[in-house]
Amino acid sequence: MDRVEDLHEETSPVLKVGVTGHRSLENEDALARDVRKVLGRIREIAASRGGVQPTIELVSPIADGTDRLVAREVLKDPTARLHVPLPFPKEDYMNDFESTGSKAEFEDLLERAYKVEVLPPTSTRDEGYEQVGVYVLDDCDVLIAIWDGKSSRGRGGTAEVVAGARERGLPLFWIHADEPGVITEELGGGF
């Protein structure tokens, strides 16, 4: 399922924002406010460096929780776009979403994506999730993480993706999952 549709001509630079984080979130309303603050800060920094407001392209596999929370906030901007790397073929990936509401939301966001890519097959699900985490890091200019600061619960988990961003000097905005309102900026090598 590779699809690329150019929805508008490029009139401004594109800033690719990756996302990682937990699938189960408490305090979603407070975390959504934090995501809006982070997006504002990202736009502010990018504009101060380039003089132009960039088009935000979210790079996200749109899993439950963090991925979708950030996608909903990003897509409130009509100029933003969504790039979805899938760790598995769509039907297989949807088996990881428990409720019909979750599956419907996934389908809705997938329909709104300007680009959808299915990544190459892997031997295990953990390897698939690890591969999509690396893909997000490889393809983004800045990373947003909603994370509790604890070790990963499996390969390709949030802690590993955050560690990868830090190793690369990728700008990171860490929204503390357990402490809404607490945001750590790690600008690394800059935008």
Image (cartoon, rainbow, N blue to C red):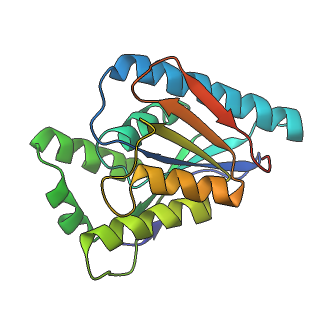
Residue at point 40%, 49% (across, down): 151
Relative image position of residue 14 (x, y in whole percent): 70, 50
Q: Is residue 74 left or right of residue 92?
A: right
Which image quadrant is residue 79 in? top right
Which image quadrant is residue 186 in? top right
The answer to whether one can see residue 19 in this image is yes
Tell which of 97 and 72 is nearer to you: 97
Relative image position of residue 120 (x, y in whole percent): 38, 80
Q: Is residue 152 left or right of residue 52?
A: left
Q: Quadrant of the N terminus?
A: bottom left
Relative image position of residue 155 (x, y in whole percent): 35, 64
Q: Please tell me whether residue 94 is drawn above or below residue 42 in the rendered image.
A: below
Q: Is residue 90 left or right of residue 130?
A: left
The answer to whether one can see residue 87 in this image is no
Q: Is residue 41 left or right of residue 66?
A: right
Residue at point 78%, 33% (across, down): 45
Q: How many marks?
A: 0
Residue at point 48%, 18% (across, down): 33
Residue at point 72%, 54% (across, down): 169
Relative image position of residue 166 (x, y in whole percent): 64, 52
